Amino acid sequence: MTEPTDPAAGTETPTADPHEDAPGVTRLVTLSDGMNAIAMTLLVINVTVPGHLDAAAFHKALNDALPGLGAFALTFTLIAGFWRDHRRILTSLPTETAVVTRLVLLGLGLVALLWFWLTLVPAHCLLGHRLPGRLLRR
């Protein structure tokens, strides 16, 4: 990337990548913002109602979608709360360390797993089905 050193002369000198000098915490906050935004956006994929239905079939399909909608609302709230608290903690840190980076990546991995939880819960738990033994150990 280049930027002019003398606007009148129009000369340019190469500069380093602007992200190389960014503080590590700022980069972690940006990564966290992006991953949480994507996770919250992907949650709505599981909330569907088929099109071209008559009134009775539409109401039944809407009723069938309610567990998914409830799981969506709960998961969205969990991710939003995690994001808010995560951002507040990260912005209060003066510097980023390897331990902080690992903990941030672990937390973001757990956020990504919440999408799996959303697909599992409405189909099995909220509709009265038991989870297979391999997924849930008693």
Image (cartoon, rainbow, N blue to C red):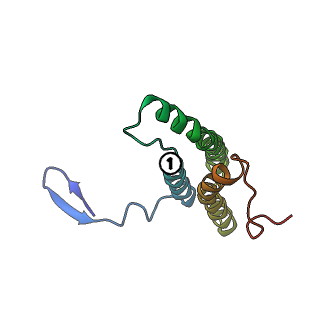
Residue toward you, 101 or 65: 65
Q: How many marks?
A: 1
Q: Quadrant of the N terminus?
A: bottom left
13 vs 75: above or below:
below
What residue is shown at x 55% (from left), y 61% (from top)? 24
- Across and down, in percent, residue 132 comes to 74, 65
Q: Is residue 133 above or below residue 22?
A: below
Residue 14: x and y in percent read 27, 67
Residue lying farthest to the left in this orientation: 9
The image quarter containing residue 85 is top right
Q: Nearer the viewer, residue 107 or 122?
A: 122
Left or right placement of residue 39 versus residue 129 in this view: left
Residue depicted at 78% across the width and 64% down the height: 136
Q: Which quarter shows the C terminus?
A: bottom right
Q: Quadrant of residue 102?
A: bottom right
Question: Residue 118, image x and y in percent?
Answer: 62, 52
Q: Secondary structure at mark 1?
A: helix
Q: Work out which residue is located at the far top of the displayed protein and give it.
A: 55
- x, y (%) of residue 2? 25, 62
Residue, disc 1: 37
Q: Residue at point 24% right, 65% down?
A: 13
- Type of amino acid at the residue the image marks with label 1: Ala
Could you classify mark 1 by the number of other residues whose Cα lies within 10 Å: few (under 14), some (14-19), or many (20 or more)? some
The residue sitting at the right extreme is: 138
Give me the residue at 68% from left, 54% from top: 124
